Amino acid sequence: MAESRSDPSPQAVTRRDFAALTALSLVLPGCAVDGASRSNGAESEAVAAPPAALRAEGVPSIPQSLLAAAQRYNRVAGHVFVDWHPERREMLLRHRAPGASTTQLYRLSQPMAEPERLTDAADPVGSARYSPSRGSSIVLSRGSGGDEAYQLLRLDPLTRATTQITAPGQRHSLLGWLKSKPLALIASVPLDRTAAAGSRSQVSTTLSLVDPDEPASTRVLAELPGGGWFDAEVSPDDASVALVRYVSAAESEVWLIQLSDSAVGSSHSKGQRAGQRRRLLPAPDSNLRATHFVAHWAADGQSLYVISDRVGEFRELMRLDLRTGTLQRLTADTPWDVEQSSESPDGRVLAINVNVDGRDEMRLIDAASGARLPLPAGVTLPEGSVTSASFHDRFNLLALVVNSARGPSQVHSLDLDSGRLDTWTTPAGTEGLNLQNLPPQQIVRWRSFDGRDISGVLSLPPARFMGRRPVVLVMHGGPEAQSKLGWQGRLNYLTQELGVAVLEPNVRGSSGYGKTFLSLDNGRLREDSVKDMASAIDWVATQPGLDAARVMVQGGSYGGYMALAAATRLADRIAGAIAVVGISNFVSFLENTESYRRDLRRVEYGDERDPAMRALLTQISPLSHVARITQPLLVVQGKNDPRVPWTESEQIVRSLQARGTPVWYILADNEGHGFARRENADYYFATLVLFVQRTLKL
């Protein structure tokens, strides 16, 4: 239900005492609850009971037939490329098989082979990487019940046995591997369960080296200030690691940390002691504020590829010469963000991903000059966005993940030596659906209150639906995320089966449109993004095929705040709202989000410890205007959410119930920042469909 490039993504939640959940369910007029069914003299249709870990308040009975019908597009599943085997033309994938509850790890030995499942657990697998030594082991991450307290486990690919290699009570991430010995570089941050307990004012990240076969041998390298350290790349000689310190969506730094004592070695590491660190970008004597991300090392270990917007509005790929400190711009002529880069084994070709107006494009460029290179003769990439491109370490083989409106992530490979393009996976769970009949999406634009152009992704229903069509505005999270062209998942049910148009606005504060646009909603400018949402409704009113009198707003995380803001600020212009893990009070959110995220969020939203900012944050929070909520509202929350604690949803729901205002509420005890388990997601979406049908009068 929500996802983003870097872990410090700006979503967050709040929690209160568990006793708050003992309030009585609110029953809407004419509706049944707790799995019961009503009869008007005729036999009632079978009713679907909520999953055991899910509590529904004020939610009408969900017909079993609706639950079954709404699952049609939920079951369609793609495959996420995870890693190449270090020695073979074989890959790791993440996939949720039809009928399975959660996403697990799979091995795929060749194109279109049957994926071999390697894990089978109640919780989904997060990241995973092969050890560089013959792929004899895999290290994967897994949380518990959506709590994001990720632990790292060693997986034996032969026996499929797993062994936890990290200590509980912290959140761990695998940053990379040393190449000369089987040591994993791990970052760990403390967890406070802040909304249920206390919080710490100072947070640090521990950097360690761990042998997954002997986790007791863990060696601490450094204690780094703050919680925003990620995107690490170990140097080719294992002497150092380059990693990112995230300050905000508009500011990040690249640091170099020594991994071992070094009397010899690369010129940039001679005489350094293990754990020593220095800032590479921006230069230590610079006050420049810009984004800097690590892409990868050059093969010679003397240069580092980085992605930065330090020169202009958009993020460019650059090469930093560590001997001279000079930066070479490789994509200066590309007026869009470069998001990823991967280097061929011989170091001559780079595959980059460029975000072109909401569509991800893969381009090949010369590593030395940045000149555009053609694809192999006769090769045409599949239709859609290439969301990821990753070279194999030994072969000129590029893994491509393609996502389109007609199918979720499909994995392909491109052999640059032979020019051969192979399809490795096709979507699962498509039985009974013809995805090729799904219409293409459109990028639409309109002017906002201050004359600024705003864009969005529009998905229209089939022509068989006559008359003006109702519209669901889907607001992304972040707030610095971006709605892009691509697979709509279960939202396809709304367009294809209910005839509802879906518009996904990229309001100010969204990424992909330059760093000025990205910062236009920061701090005291927060409600300007709400005005952009209102301008989207203005645009709907100008479209002859759309019905501005039947507009609903739905969003998750920060998008959940936008849905609540619409319910309070735009109540006379919308028919209803759906808030998923949404912020209802910025002050309580900032006080109760996990400690390691708090300072990162303060940069975006403002510091609640400052009295003037606290007053503003309180004034713009939906909870302060709950009396304005007059239209139907559906609130959805995971109780283990460390980002937007569950108390954010609790307080808005309880306040409405105290006023006698109807509200539908779903709370899952085994979920976090979104619903990862299929049974919960299916029930939630069936509830959403019923809410949409009733609210938009379908």
Image (spheres, rainbow, N blue to C red):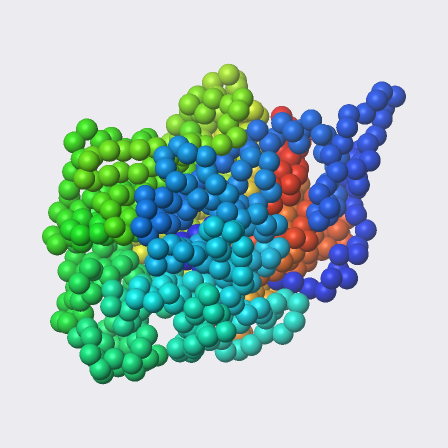
Foreground residue among 418 and 482: 418
Residue sitting at x 81%, y 51%? 24
Image height of 380 relative to 606, above or below: above
Q: Would residue 217 be found to the left or right of residue 577 on screen? A: left
Residue 182 percent location from the top left of the image: 37, 65
Residue 129 percent location from the top left of the image: 41, 55
Tell me if I can see residue 277 in this picture.
no
Residue 259, quarter of picture: bottom left
Task: Residue at the far front: name it.
Answer: 159
Foreground residue among 390 and 424: 424
Foreground residue among 134 and 313: 134
Q: Would residue 207 be found to the left or right of residue 352 on screen? A: right
Residue sitting at x 62%, y 33%? 689
Residue sitting at x 56%, y 35%? 98
Residue sitting at x 75%, y 56%? 21
Tell me if I can see residue 461 in this picture.
yes
Residue 637 percent location from the top left of the image: 63, 51
Residue 571 percent location from the top left of the image: 60, 44
Quadrant showing the C terminus: top right
